[in-house]
Image (cartoon, rainbow, N blue to C red):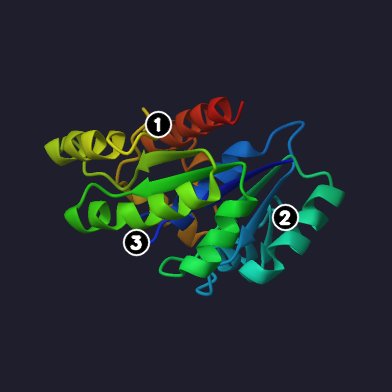
Amino acid sequence: MKTIAFLSQKGGGGKTTLAVHCAVAAIGKNSRVAVIDTDPQGTATRWGQSRDSDSPAVAKATAQQLDDVLAAARHDNMTYCIIDSAPHASPSASRVAAAADIIIIPVRPTAFDLAAVPATVAIVQAANKPAVFVLSACPTRSPETAEAGDVLASYGFPVAPVIIHERRAFSRAVATGRAVTEFEPTGKAAAEIDALWKWIKGELK
């Protein structure tokens, strides 16, 4: 089982959105996927409860319960376990980082989001785990996105070549308990998520 943590010390960066969308993209003929929601807000849990499908499995847990929940996921032969972490919770974030095989750091191309990156990077470095940045909720045709990518690259972690843009399909899909690949499978948002998940899988290897 591969464990993928979505981690950011800044709220509103698209962490939960990317976590649940990658979870759906990961579901395949021979893949079983679980989402562990360690965010007290429980957004991923509510999304899971609103779905018509029972896949991916969504479980709510505290960071202290994480090891037990991951052990249960391994026992259930999950292929991927995706952890949605809480922002502004360094002790919990450290536990999440320590449990992950790879850490995904979503970042919006804004000054506030970029200012929060060093705190997240410090947690990743302390855990000594591989990590990648994903530019998330980006305006279309914005020079700030390329500039943010240059800033992120300076930290020494890979920056995903796939940019996730701010699109209405994301909010519409989540509101109905779906991912964009289910809500609008031929749309631009779905194409971005499919490409991002393919790239993340390559980084896992």
Label 1 vs 3, first from the N-terminus: 3
In space, the residues marked 1 and 2 are separated at their CA atoms by 33 Å
Q: Which residue is mark 1?
A: 158
Residue found at x 64% / y 59%: 36
Left or right: residue 147 versus residue 55 is left
Mark 2 or mark 3, which has the lower sequence index?
3
Residue 190 at x, y percent in the picture = 45, 36
Write the residue at 46% across / 55% down: 123
Dot 1 falls on a residue whose secondary structure is loop
In-image side of 31 versus 88 (left or right): right
Q: Position of residue 154 (x, y in %)?
A: 27, 35
Residue type for callout 3:
Gly
As drawn, 65 above or below 176: below
Q: Amino acid at mark 2?
A: Asp
Assess disc 1: are there few (<14), some (14-19) or many (≥20) residues with their C-alpha within 10 Å of its C-alpha. Answer: some
Query: Which residue matches tag 2?
Result: 54
Quarter placement of the N terminus: top right
* Dot 1 and dot 2 residues touching (CB under 8 Å): no
Number of labelled discs? 3
- Name which residue type carries label 1: Pro
Q: Residue furthest left?
A: 143
Q: Earlier in the sequence, mark 1 or mark 2?
A: 2
Contact between marks 1 and 3 (CB within 8 A): the answer is: no
Residue that lies at the very extreme toward the bottom in this rendered image: 40
Secondary-structure class at tag 2: loop
